[in-house]
Image (spheres, rainbow, N blue to C red):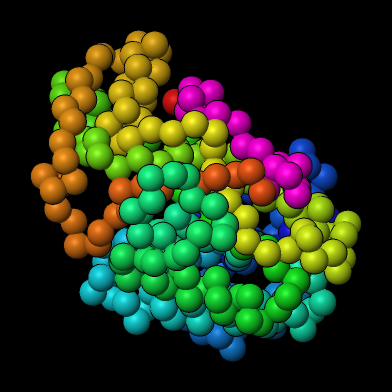
Amino acid sequence: MRVVVTGRQGQVTRALAERASSAGATLIALGRPELDLERPQSIAPALAAARPDIVVNAAAYTAVDHAESEEAQAFAVNAAGAGAVAAAVLALGVPVIQISTDYVFDGSSLLPYREEDATGPVSAYGRSKLAGEQAVAAATPDHVILRTAWVYAPFGRNFVRTMLRLGEERSEVAVVGDQTGCPTSALDIADAVLSVARNLVAGPGDPALRGVFHMAAQGEADWASFAEAIFAEAAAHGRAPVAVRRIATSDYPTPARRPANSRLDGTKLAAIHGVRLPPWRGSLAACV
């Protein structure tokens, strides 16, 4: 199975590169300059030359706070770019997997979000990703949209690596304690994406396998609890203990609003694709 993924440096792409061979897949990562989501004319030739069995659109504008002042650029990449990828993939006659986010929701629900729940992004980044979902769905019926949340990995820029760095510099770290989500390992995401990709390639034209799915680790945490777990794992490996001081979202203002509830219900993905991500604590331990 030839899996072409957009973007070279993102956490999901790097995780896919680590996991592809063990899943019996060949991974081809395409990025700038030959494939640039801000240059739609570059997309179709680059994808055609790679001869994919399936395409994973993992490239995205992910600077959540900067998107508030760069909304046009966020939409160019996350919406128009995603739609152009899907249109090119339709022409090739293969499926596309679009990686999306919990930020398409407003976070006001008291329950984990299901796929049929109403969207309502409260940030420019969230609006751009929702527009990307809509563009992909409009461009080709042969799509899966995988929404995930709170992604971390041993590489790249993410919360786990930031906490580990701060823990070397401080004995106490202030962390928001009133936002809840599902910390999700990029390596677990890669395994899930490859399983879904295999199902799509094996089941061409099966509408039940297509559509929107939520893909997040089992369990939940707030950011402060997540940080405490990170520091506990680090201490088990000989790092000095670090205290976590819980603060409110209002104590740490950011340009972009974050959903207070980012929990995603993965029941549909497990039922239809047979894919359930593992509990986050075990994956965090492996990452640390």
- Quadrant of the rendering where the N terminus is positioned: bottom right
Measured along the vertical axis of the image, is residue 221 above or below residue 240? below
- Quadrant of the rendering where the C terminus is positioned: top left
Q: Is residue 47 left or right of residue 68?
A: right
Q: Is residue 66 left or right of residue 155?
A: left
Residue pictured at 82% horizontal, 45% vertical: 24
Pick the residue in front: 1 or 185. Answer: 185
Q: Position of residue 283 (x, y in %)?
A: 53, 28
Residue pictured at 33% horizontal, 53% vertical: 108
Q: Position of residue 214 (x, y in %)?
A: 58, 51
Residue 258 sits in which quadrant? bottom left
Measured along the vertical axis of the image, is residue 42 above or below residue 280? below
Q: Residue furthest front?
A: 110
Q: Residue furthest left?
A: 251
Q: Is residue 199 left or right of residue 175?
A: right
Q: In the image, which residues are magenta?
A: 269-287
Pick the residue in front: 153 or 200. Answer: 200
